[in-house]
Amino acid sequence: MDGNSIAQAAGDKASDDPAPQGGLFDAPVFTDPSARALSQVGVIDVGSNSVRLVVFDGAARSPAYFFNEKVLCGLGRGLVNTGRLNPEGCERALATLRRFALLAQGMALSNLTMVGTAAMREAADGPEFVARIESETGLRMRVIDGAEEARLSAQGVLTGWPEADGLVCDIGGSSMELAVIGERKVHQTVTSPLGPFRLQQIAGGKKGLRKHIGDTLKALRDKVGDHHDSLYLVGGSWRAIARLDMERRGYPLKVLHEYAMTPKSIRKTIDWVETQDLAELRRRTGISTERMSLVPLAAQVLRQLVHVFSPGTIYVSSYGIREGILYEQMPDDLRARDPLIEACHFMEHSGARLPGFGKQLYGFVLPLYRSQPESRLRLIRAACLLHDVNWRAHPDYRADACFDTTTRANLGGLDHQGRVFLGIALMYRYKTNGMRPRIKEIAGLLSEKDFAEAKILGRALRFGSMFSMDRPGHAGELRHYPKKHVLELILKRELKDLFTEVAEQRFNALAEQLGATTKVRVGRDYNSKGAASKSGSG
């Protein structure tokens, strides 16, 4: 039997067993026909500052970026003064869109949506440019209004944060949109002229600019309310400010999605940026010249946005209007799925030696986590699904590759502490001790308690993953008695020979991490059909 046949056989065995808890390991969404219909969705976003093509592929519920390219064209530069699109920006946008049309043709995209936002809807020559685009590229653009832009951006946030509750703020070159989200729905939506291109034209110097921003935000507050503990930031200018916040703080993890900031931190960063050389900051952070030129104005908006709405926590979302368009096409049953678990299912399916084993491994280690909340159980499920996806890495670097998979991968529904927790657990699934300096620095984002629990999970994965090649729960059963400080392994008599020296070492290492003594006994025998034939103990 070849490797593929072995993996298929293991997957078939795994699918025969019920999930340890109802619904936790439903069939992966990417195998569903409705998901396969979304397996390659293209979106072209023609904004006031940038033009971008994204093609989503893979697990539809958790966006995987098959293609992602952006050009800063600046269509909205000078719009306030002239009422027309920037001529140079139009030529850059056309050249970009001609390229995108050919790329879409080469990828045989049958599902391609193009939307135009603030600059396109407000410019007097917008309709003319839309017609020119269609004539020269064959691409058809849908120009959306501010309310629709806000709704789609908010749906993008819900793509990564199904349980998000608060205020979404999407800033572009010529406008800024707000949307209230909660209970997996988008509620009020409003738009405003607070994009940096427009703010460049405000008279009255710094004082006039502050008054204009403040008055506009207070009017918006009257429409969407100010009782929002969480603020979700969407847009390149916000991401640039978040990257600068990381630089000021010396933050060790550079993933912007779900990066969290406090109002105090934002104010410190804005004050700090005003004293820095922007060219030097660009060099250190990789922010483009075009984007950095808009940061000072965007920072003034953010300073007052935080002041007017008083959120407790500010989150950065890398998901926005493009992901919102993908979300728009999902049926309700896909939207209801957990984006983290779906992404991990897909990674196991495409990268693990034995797809389906993660479900069995979760059932085996679950007795260690009977009292854990759902938020922790979903991380344990994710770790079980990912435990083997880096098996092709060189053994000397496999533990590091595991850590990097979770801390650097494009994963939704996972905050930074969750990323590091998974990274440490998967690292200790392979590694017995020690960490490289860069990993140790990132691991400092975890509390001592969470670090210890991640290490325990790693030891459990290390034992369970080698205890059986199909179903570790079929070979034995774990029982944990925390109050008695006992970890028990009950072996099936017919499979007790799986528990030899290496397995025993890994079992003892898990018990040591738990602060428990070990107990091993032999339980019931099973015949070839799985029926109990007799019992015994040892």
Image: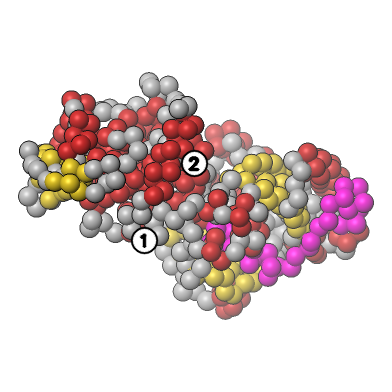
Q: Residue 323: percent from the left, percent from the top?
A: 62, 55
Q: Is residue 296 visible?
A: no
Q: Amino acid at mark 1?
A: Gly
Q: How many marks?
A: 2
Which residue is at a point 63% across and 67% down the rendered structure image?
151
Q: Is residue 189 above or below residue 136?
A: below
Magenta region: which residues? 130-159
Q: Which mark is residue 111?
A: none
Q: Secondary structure at mark 1?
A: loop
Q: Main secondary structure of the magenta part?
A: helix
- Whether the residues at callouts 2 and 1 have beta carbons within 8 Å, the answer is no
Q: Is residue 107 visible?
A: yes
* Residue 406 lies within the magenta run: no
Q: Pointer 1: what residue?
A: 22
Q: Secondary structure at mark 2?
A: helix
Q: Pointer 2: what residue?
A: 349
455 left or right, relative to 400: left
15 left or right, relative to 453: right
Of the two numbered discs 2 and 1 on the same chain, state the one appearing first in sequence: 1
Q: Amino acid at mark 2?
A: His
385 left or right, relative to 333: left
- Give whichever of 242, 210 is nearer the camera: 242
Q: Is residue 419 above or below residue 331?
A: above
Q: Residue 191: percent from the left, percent from the top?
A: 67, 69
Q: Is residue 470 above or below residue 331?
A: above
Which residue is at a point 50% across and 63% down the rendered structure image?
336
